[in-house]
Structure formats: C-alpha cells, structure tokens
Amino acid sequence: MLYVVQTALELGFMYALVALALFLSFRVLNIADMTTDGAFTLGCAVSATLAVAGHPLLALPAAMLAGACAGSITALLQTTLKIPSILAGIITNTGLYTINLAVMGFSSNVNMMKSKTLFSLVQPSLGSVYKLLPAALITLVVAVLLVVFLKTRLGLSIRATGDNPDMVRASSINTGFTITIGLCMSNAMTALSGAVLAQYQKTADINLGTGMVIIGLASLIIGETLLPKGKLWMKALGAVAGSIVYRFIIAIALRLDLPSECLKLISATIVALAIGLPAIRGAMKPATKGGKSKC
C-alpha cells in the first residue's frame, strides 16, 4: 500500500507540471493550446536522447528549450498568420510527431535502462525517496517561480492579455509578444514534465504524450474544485494538488483491477464531472424565491 501511495505522489508531482502549464495557457492567457501532447513527447525524446548520451542533468534545460521552441511556433501561427489558437496548436502538434521521431533517431522508443538518470544520480544520498523528493522539488520550484513571474510587470501584462486583450492593445502593449512568452513558458513546463517522466520510467515512447491535454485539464479542474478561489499562489497550489488527487484516482482504479484500456475513459469522465460539478450542485438545490422553497 505504501508503494502505491508513494508512486501516486511521484507521478502526481511530475504531471503537475502539465497542470501548471495549462493553468498558464488555459486560465491565465485564455488560450486552448493543443500543443501539449507533442511538447510533452518532445521533452521525453530530448531527455532520453541526452541521458543515453551521458548528460541526464543537461537534458532537463534542453527539454525546456525545445518545448519553448514548440510554443513559439504555435504563437507565430496564431499571432502572425492569424490562425485560430486551437488550430495553430493542432498544426504544431502534428508537425512535432515527425520532429520527435527525428530526435529519437527515427525510432519509436529510446531505452535508458543502462544509462544514468537524474534519479539514479541522487539515489545513494536519498535512499527510498530518491524519486519522490526530486520530483516534488522540481515541481514546487517551478510553481513558485511561475507565481513570482506572474506578479512582475511582464507577468501582469500576460495576465491582462488573457483578461482583456483589447484593453491591453489600447495600452500600447504588444499582445503578440505576451502571447508568445506565455505559450513558450507553458510548453517549456510541459516538456520539462515529459523530460522528468522519461528519466523516471527509463524509457521514451513516441506515444507517451497522447491524451496529455485531458490529464492536465483533469488535474487543473480537480484542483480548482477542491481549493477555494483565491490568490495566485492558491491557484498554482490547486493545480499541483489536483494532479496528485488525479493520480490517486487512477491508482484506485488500477487497484480495482479495471482494465488499463479504460483509463482514458476514466480521465474523460473525471473532466466532465469536474466541469459540470457547479451545474450538478445547482440542480440538486431546490429552487428558491425570496428565501423560500417553491412548492
């Protein structure tokens, strides 16, 4: 049982980076960025390739840089070519499939069983929590840096762009620039999540990023449902907490011997229920008028 809890925590912290990325793009910038799946796989591919080459630590910033480049392509399509945000993300995501294959040497997977990873390097000093502590530390540091950044002048401009882009343009702020910075940061965090997960599993596969948007949204919405709406740090904490809760739900589903093929359906159901929870609560409450229930 302890192993199941620890594994859920480890995966929860790693996937929380995707939830934080979607918090930035989906909630702050108000953009449905579909680059997530491809950027996650890109992070896996870069991390695995560099780890096999003997550079497991360098793999993390390299993966973030690659993810930022993917985000910049989506931003370019959206801001310069005026392609709708959803379609721009789909176009980039489609192109990333070939790029990810190229990064992995046109192989569908990369095996790191004989290579050093971030976790194997710290195992002698951290013991049984050699996977949990690095995953938690990386995620919490990223969350803190994200909150601090969003309170800077540039961060406030990004937040204003998501709230009211017309007002931002009237204030002589380049919305194309703020959108580009936001999407680059979002996809950098997504790629970092993939990079950490690849070294955690000691393998990278071309299909690892499939459905990552659903997982990230499920985590984000669960966090928003559990924690009250408040300050920026509370929202970031909610994304992390939601990811951990989501992994526990998946762990429970696996303990109930549900087929692994059902996990995508479970994820979709969780998202649907989380989004529809306010409507469900409203339907369960009796209609009132003047403080009295209607008869």
Image (tube, rainbow, N blue to C red):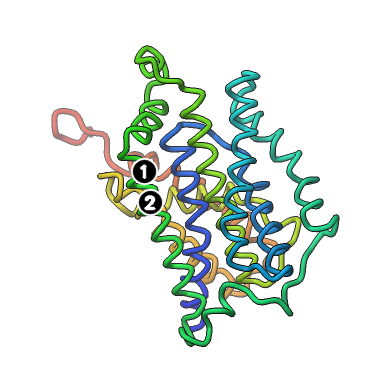
The amino acid on which the numbered mark 1 sits, given as a three-letter code, is: Phe
- Which secondary structure, mark 2? helix
Mark 2, residue position: 145
Asked if residue 232 lies left or right of residue 266, the reply is left
Q: Establish if 15 lies above or below 168.
A: below
Residue placed furthest toward the top: 170
Q: Residue at x 74, y 61 (%)?
A: 205
Indicate whether 111 appears above or below 98: below
221 over 193 or under it: above or below: above
**What is the CA distance from the residue labelled 2 to the residue labelled 1?**
6 Å
Circle 1 residue: 149
Bin the neighbour count of mark 2 within 10 Å (Cα to Cα): few under 14, some 14-19, many 20 and up: few
Tell me residue 28's x, y (percent): 41, 36
In this rendering, would 267 be left or right of 178? Answer: right
Residue drawn at (61%, 45%) of the image: 36
- Residue nearest the viewer, comparing 29 with 247: 29
Residue 287 occupies which quadrant of the picture? top left
Q: 290 and 72: which one is in front? A: 72
Residue 140 at what x, y percent from top left?
39, 61
